[in-house]
Image (cartoon, helix red, strand yellow):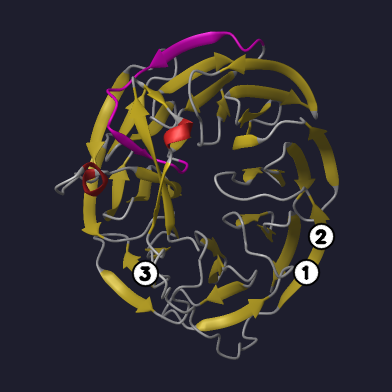
C-alpha cells in the first residue's frame, strides 16, 4: 500500500543503502480494509485509445510530458517515448541496468539515473554518455537550457552539460540525519531553477547554483529524527508563477515563484503530490481521503472518503475531472466541484504505478506490470 514510506539515513555525508530503514504505517496485523467500490456512473464517457508496454515499473520513476509526447521508463531500464494521442512509439532504448529516477527530457536529450548512481543521457533512443553520481538519486532529471540538472536523495543539486556530461556546478546542502526516500521537487520556472530542500523551496540561478530566493513551506516538529523530518514531494500544481505543493505528512502550501514568497500554508497529512487549476487544488491524504482546497487561501472546500485505503496515486486535473489511480488499477474520475464520482475505468488489474498525466487531450496511465494506456475522456 502507498502508506508504506521509506527513509534513508545519512552516514558520513553519504547514503548507505544497506541501512535503509523501512517504516510501514500499515505494518500492523490489522491493516485498514480498502473501501469497497460503489457502482460507478457514466457521467463522463472514457474510451481506451491505445495500449503499449514498457516493462514492470513503479515508484520512484515518473512519466514525463513533452509537448504531445509522453516518456516512460521501466524499473529494469527500458525507456520509451510515445505520441500521446495515437500511442505511436517514437523511440525505445534498453539500458540493461535498473533505474532509480527518470525520465527527464527537453526533446533533444533524455536523461535517467541508474541504481548504480549513473546519470545516463540519450538522444533519439541512443545512449550518448554516462556520468557517475556520488549518491542515490530518486528525483527525475530536469533537462533545460542545454543542461541536465540532478537532485540527489539528500537534495544536493548538480548541473551537467547536456552534450558532454561535463560537471558544471554542485550546490551541496547540510545533511539531515534522514531524508525521504521518494522524488522531490526540481523544475524550471522562467529562468529560475526551483528545488525543494527539507521544508523549503529554493529558487536557484541555473548558471551557477546560487540561491535567488528561499521560501519556507513547513518546519519539522517532534521528539525524534523521524518526527522532525520535513521534505517537499514531487507533484506540483503550477498556474503561471504560482506553485502549489505538499510537504510530506505536514502541510500543503502555495508559493509565488517570481519573488519566492509563501502565500499560505495549511496542515495536511499526505505523502503524494497535488494537482489543480486556477481556483482549486486537489490531493489525497495518506489514508486515501480526497481533499479540495481553495487556491486563494487554502481553505478546505470538500473532502471525500469513498476511496480510503485504496493506495491512491497523485491526482491529475483533466478538463472537467480530477483523476486518481488505485492499487487495483482503476482510474477514478472525480467531480472537482463536490468530490462525487463521475466515472471509473479499469486498466490491466495491476496498480497504477505512476501519477497519470494529461497530454494532447489524452490521459496516459502506467501500471506496475508496465502497461502504458491512453484514454480519451469526452
Describe residue 284's horizontal placement relative to residue 216 as left or right.
right
Q: Residue at x 47, y 41 (%)?
A: 183
Nearest to the observer: residue 305 or residue 66: 305
Q: What residue does disc 2 label?
A: 51
Where residue 289 appears, x then y in whole percent?
39, 73
Q: Is residue 166 left or right of residue 185?
A: right
Residue at mark 1 to residue at mark 3: CA–CA distance: 28 Å
Q: Does residue 86 appear in the picture of this structure?
A: no
Q: Dot 3 corresponds to which residue? A: 292
Circle 2: element type: strand
Task: Give the vertical position of 176 relative to 225 (above or below).
Answer: above
> Between 13 and 368, which is closer to the camera in this rendering?
13
Q: Are marks 1 and 2 in contact (CB under 8 Å)?
A: yes
For mark 1, what is the residue?
48
Residue 244 in percent (x, y) is at 36, 51
Q: Secondary structure at mark 3?
A: strand
Please state the extent of the stretch shown in magenta in the rendering. 164-183
* Residue drawn at x 77%, y 56% as measured from the top left: 85
Q: Is residue 22 visible?
A: yes
181 in the magenta segment = yes
Element type at marker 1? Answer: strand
Q: Residues within 10 Å of mark 3 (few under 14, many from 20)?
A: many
Question: Residue 114, percent across and down?
Answer: 63, 29
| Spatial separation of the CA atoms under disc 1 and disc 2 | 8 Å
Which is more foreground, mark 2 or mark 3?
Answer: 2
Amino acid at each position: 500500500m502507498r502508506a508504506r514510506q521509506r527513509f534513508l539515513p545519512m552516514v558520513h555525508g553519504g547514503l548507505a543503502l544497506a541501512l535503509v530503514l523501512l517504516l510501514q504505517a500499515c505494518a500492523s496485523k490489522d491493516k485498514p480494509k480498502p473501501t469497497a467500490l460503489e457502482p460507478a456512473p457514466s457521467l463522463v464517457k472514457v474510451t481506451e485509445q491505445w495500449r503499449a508496454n514498457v516493462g514492470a515499473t513503479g515508484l520512484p520513476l515518473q512519466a514525463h510530458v513533452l509537448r504531445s509526447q509522453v516518456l516512460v521508463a521501466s524499473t529494469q531500464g527500458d525507456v520509451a517515448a510515445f505520441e500521446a494521442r495515437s500511442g505511436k512509439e517514437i523511440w525505445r532504448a534498453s539500458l540493461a541496468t535498473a533505474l532509480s529516477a527518470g525520465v527527464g527530457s527537453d526533446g533533444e536529450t533524455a536523461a535517467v539515473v541508474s541504481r548504480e548512481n549513473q546519470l545516463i543521457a540519450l538522444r533519439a533512443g541512443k545512449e550518448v554518455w554516462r556520468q557517475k553520481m556520488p549518491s542515490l538519486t530518486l528525483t527525475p532529471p530536469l533537462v533545460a537550457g542545454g543542461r541536465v540538472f540532478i537532485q540527489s536523495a539528500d537534495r544536493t543539486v548538480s548541473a551537467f552539460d547536456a552534450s558532454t556530461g561535463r560537471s558544471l556546478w554542485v550546490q551541496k546542502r547540510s545533511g539531515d540525519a534522514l531524508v525521504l526516500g521518494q522524488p522531490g521537487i526540481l523544475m524550471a520556472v522562467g529562468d529560475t531553477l526551483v528545488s525543494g530542500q527539507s521544508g523549503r523551496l529554493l529558487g536557484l540561478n541555473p548558471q551557477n547554483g546560487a540561491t535567488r530566493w528561499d521560501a519556507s513551506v513547513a518546519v519539522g516538529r517532534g521528539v525524534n529524527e523521524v518526527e522532525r523530518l520535513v521534505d517537499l514531494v514531487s507533484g506540483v500544481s503550477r498556474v503561471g508563477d504560482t506553485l502549489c505543493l505538499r510537504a510530506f505528512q505536514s502541510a500543503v502550501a502555495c508559493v509565488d515563484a517570481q519573488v519566492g514568497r509563501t502565500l499560505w500554508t495549511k496542515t495536511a497529512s499526505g505523502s503524494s503530490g497535488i494537482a489543480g487549476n486556477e481556483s482549486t487544488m486537489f490531493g489525497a491524504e495518506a489514508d486515501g481521503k480526497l481533499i479540495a482546497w481553495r487556491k486563494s487561501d487554502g481553505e478546505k472546500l470538500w473532502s471525500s472518503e469513498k476511496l480510503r485505503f485504496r493506495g491512491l496515486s497523485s491526482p491529475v486535473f483533466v478538463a472537467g475531472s480530477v483523476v486518481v489511480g488505485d492499487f487495483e488499477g482503476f482510474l477514478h474520475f472525480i467531480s472537482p466541484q463536490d468530490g462525487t464520482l463521475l466515472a471509473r475505468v479499469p486498466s490491466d488489474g495491476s496498480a497504477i504505478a505512476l501519477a497519470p498525466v494529461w497530454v494532447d487531450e489524452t490521459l496516459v496511465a502506467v501500471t506496475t506490470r508496465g502497461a502504458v494506456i491512453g484514454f480519451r475522456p469526452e
